[in-house]
Amino acid sequence: MNLQSYSDQDLVKAYLTGDESVLEELLNRHKSKIYTSIYLLVKDQYLAEDIFQDAFIKVINTLRSGRYNEEGKFLPWVMRIAHNLVIDYFRREKRAPVITSADGTDVLNMLQVYEESAEDKILREQTHTDLRTLIQLLPDEQKEVLIMRHYADLSFKEIADLTEVSINTALGRMRYALSNLRKMMKVKEVT
């Protein structure tokens, strides 16, 4: 039986009728995209693997309980589960991910063009700490979009799909997040 020719929906139906072998095909078909989306948010290989496994455990449990009703939308459904697990992780940890550039270096710790003094370094580090703290004070919807856009480098279309809102709503949340950050920075006198 050539499972690759089956749609996700057909594989889910086969799984629901007791054919557990099709689960491996579903997993192999989508693992790269799902794992990558998790890794982009958490920036940690082992944590991403844990969340990926948790996501598929949740998928299996939901399928087995008969609560799956996402006709023909298996991948977006699994991506949403994975995304929610990442958000839950950040809420539990109460920490902001590190902002990294394409080469993996922490953007907030980029070397300065000039030789910075010890005082400048302390001020810069304090400013970055203050900014991370302020980000945690944003409403969850705004913080989520900000983290996904700037920390995970997702497009607004990807953010809209993952959070199940329109692109305009995602853009609006980002605008409010940046506006609120600016206001908080003025109050806290963060430069």
Image: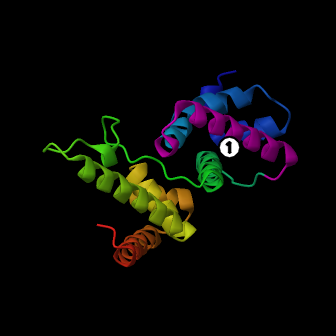
> Where does label 1 land, which residue?
9
Please state the horizontal and vertical placement of residue 104, each as a whole percent of the image.
Answer: 35, 36
Question: How many numbered marks appear?
Answer: 1
Q: What amino acid is at disc 1?
A: Gln
Q: Quadrant of the N terminus?
A: top right
Q: Position of residue 88 (x, y in %)?
A: 65, 53
Which region of the structure is painted magenta? 40-67
SS majority, magenta = helix
Q: Is residue 47 visible?
A: yes
Counting from the top left corner in percent of width and height, residue 24 is at: 69, 27
Q: Is residue 157 magenta?
A: no
Visual colour scheme: rainbow
Q: Quadrant of residue 6?
A: top right
Name the side, left or right, on which 138 lies relative to 156.
Answer: right
Residue 165 showing in the rendered view: no
Nearest to the observer: residue 6 or residue 108: 108
Position above or below: 107 against 167? above
At x 30% / y 34%, what residue is drawn?
103
Residue 61 as seen in the image, left or right of residue 169: right
Residue at image location 54% in from the left, 42% down from the top: 38
Q: Residue at x 84, y 42 (%)?
A: 64
Q: Is residue 65 magenta?
A: yes
Nearer to us in this view, 142 or 80:
142
* Front residue of 57 and 140: 140
Residue farthest toward the left in the current orientation of the protein: 114
